[in-house]
Image (cartoon, grey):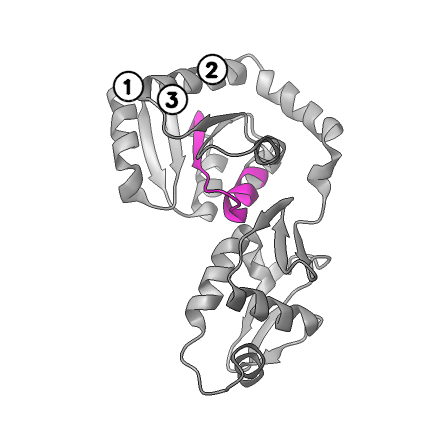
């Protein structure tokens, strides 16, 4: 039996898998917030973390890196749709110990969890991770990169899909070189008019795609927005 922390976007969607794992004898706790996952892992109450990964999502990659940065030997298994070899490499480099393509059987998932537990208990995860930094120096690449010509956001080496509106918002903010862009200017430059509805949903989706790097997209109350450059360190107030 393992104590499993299940990191998901949608707790309702994950209930069936969690229920099946409990029938296999495991204890399962669902968690939908990356910050809460990290806090729970620090308590050292779990044996394995399951992370549901959706293609080209920066949030899960940031979570994997943060979990591994904790220096803990906890096993990390990623559940994901079938992805290409390049994306699998990024998942493993980010900190995953294994990858299981969806759809999968409960028996296969249970067996993968057992395999991760064996490696964790015999020290295999520690040795594998200590070697990965030497084998994959690209892990230390900048967390966030905005490729202007391609109009593409890249986080931890993975291209993140942006809508045309999200792309325009980032272009405006990054073009301001970390200076605050007033709300009226954002509306005018992105939509061509100051008379538009709420832009909060667009900002919320951008923060979701940035994952643990969402602090870079800063709201200055009553003034506007700014985007802190990839080279910027995280301010203490955002920790």
Closer to the eye: label 3 or 1? 3
User: Alpha-carbon neighbours of circle 1 within 10 Å: few (<14), some, or many (≥20)?
Assistant: few
Q: Earlier in the sequence, mark 1 or mark 2?
A: 1
Residue 71, how many percent across, how many down? 61, 32
Q: Residue at x 31, y 43 (%)?
A: 11
Q: Which label is found at residue 228?
A: none
- Residue that carries the numbered disc 1 in the rendered image: 25
Residue 125, how many percent across, how many down? 58, 21
In what element is the residue under mark 1? Answer: loop
User: Alpha-carbon neighbours of circle 2 within 10 Å: few (<14), some, or many (≥20)?
Assistant: some
- Residue that carries the numbered disc 2 in the rendered image: 115
**Going by the image, does 46 lie left or right of 148?**
left
Is 20 above or below relative to 238?
above
- Residue that carries the numbered disc 3 in the rendered image: 109
Residue 3, how many percent across, how many down? 37, 25
| Snapshot quadrant of residue 228 | bottom right
Q: Quick check: marks 3 and 1 in contact, CB under 8 Å?
A: no
Q: Residue at x 61, y 78 (%)?
A: 181
Closer to the eye: label 3 or 2? 3
Is 136 above or below relative to 162?
above
Q: Nearer the viewer, residue 85 or 79?
A: 85
Q: Nearer the viewer, residue 113 or 102?
A: 102
**Going by the image, does 55 lie left or right of 19?**
right
Residue 51 magenta-highlighted: yes
Q: Which residues are magenta?
A: 46-65
Q: Earlier in the sequence, mark 3 or mark 2?
A: 3
Residue 78, how many percent across, how many down? 47, 31
Count of numbered circles in the view: 3
Q: CA distance from mark 3 to mark 2?
A: 10 Å
Q: CA distance from mark 3 to mark 1?
A: 13 Å
């Amino acid at each position: 039996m393992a104590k499993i922390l299940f990191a998901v976007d949608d707790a309702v969607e994950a209930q069936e898998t969690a229920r099946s794992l409990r029938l296999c004898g495991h204890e399962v706790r669902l968690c939908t917030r990356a910050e809460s996952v990290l806090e729970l892992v620090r308590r050292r109450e779990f044996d394995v973390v399951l992370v549901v990964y959706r293609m080209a999502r920066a949030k899960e990659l940031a979570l994997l890196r943060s979990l591994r940065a904790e220096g803990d030997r906890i096993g990390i298994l990623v559940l994901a749709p079938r992805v290409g070899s390049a994306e699998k490499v990024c998942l493993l480099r980010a900190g995953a110990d294994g990858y299981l393509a969806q759809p999968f059987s409960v028996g296969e998932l249970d067996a993968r969890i057992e395999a991760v537990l064996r490696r964790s208990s015999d020290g295999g995860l520690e040795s594998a991770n200590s070697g990965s930094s030497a084998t994959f120096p690209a892990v230390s690449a900048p967390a966030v990169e905005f490729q202007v010509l391609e109009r593409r956001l890249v986080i931890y080496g993975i291209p993140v899909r942006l809508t045309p509106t999200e792309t325009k918002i980032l272009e405006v903010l990054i073009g301001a070189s970390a200076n605050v862009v007033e709300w009226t200017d954002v509306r005018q430059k992105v939509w061509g008019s100051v008379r538009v509805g709420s832009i909060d949903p667009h900002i919320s989706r951008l923060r979701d795609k940035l994952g643990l790097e969402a602090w870079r997209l800063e709201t200055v109350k009553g003034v506007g927005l700014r985007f802190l450059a990839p080279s910027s360190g995280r301010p203490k107030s955002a920790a």
